[in-house]
Amino acid sequence: MKLKNNTVFDCAVIDISKVHNEAGNITVVENEINIPFNVKRVYYLYDVPGGEARGGHAHYELEQYVIAASGSFDVILDDGKNRKIVTLNRPNLALHIVPGLWRELDNFSSGSICLVLASHKYDESDYIRDYEEFLEFKK
Ligand code: TYD
């Protein structure tokens, strides 16, 4: 399979609007309304021990919205030429990660929750988990 030649500049932080009132906020993500792909899977990372990093991999096809549903963490994006670090710290901000990029997550604050909305079901054959292999495929 061919790895997409997207770059870190194809990823953006999207401000998802929120419904606000004095009793709190609601943020809504709805297929075909305010997300550029259909969500097939939702998962969340939590109880990440201090100092741990997650997500050292790339995807061939999968794209995702990554949201700090609680707390904060950093997402390191890498396209083989450029690296970009995005800090997520508000539940109404989503980082859109396009396919073909290496990503890592670190600096999790205590109690943080990383919510991921993904365009595909879990499929190990869509992953590249070896960074050297990733660099080779990006050439
Ligand atoms: P992994 O993708 O390695 O996590 P991360 O990239 O965040 O460090 O997944 C860890 C384990 O969880 C691995 O055994 C695969 C499994 N897993 C599923 O079974 N389904 C899923 O949707 C995800 C995201 C992971």
Image: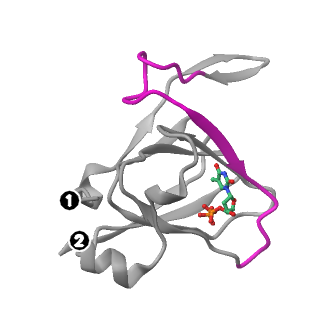
Q: Is residue 24 above or below residue 48?
A: above
Q: Is residue 9 above or below residue 20?
A: below
Name the residue furthest bottom: 132
Q: How is the image coloured?
A: one colour
Mark 2 burial class by Cα count in 10 Å: few <14, some 14-19, many 20+: some
**Span highlighted in magenta in the image:** 28-51
Q: Is residue 32 left or right of residue 136?
A: right
Q: Amino acid at mark 2?
A: Lys
Nearest the viewer among 44 and 50 is 44
Does the Cβ of the disc 1 residue fall within 8 Å of ligand 1? no
CB atoms at circles 2 and 1 under 8 Å apart?
yes
Q: Earlier in the sequence, mark 2 or mark 1?
A: 1
Nearest the viewer among 68 and 137 is 137
Disc number for residue 138: 2
Using the rendered image of the protein, determine whether residue 70 is visible from the camera's viewpoint: no
Disc number for residue 5: 1
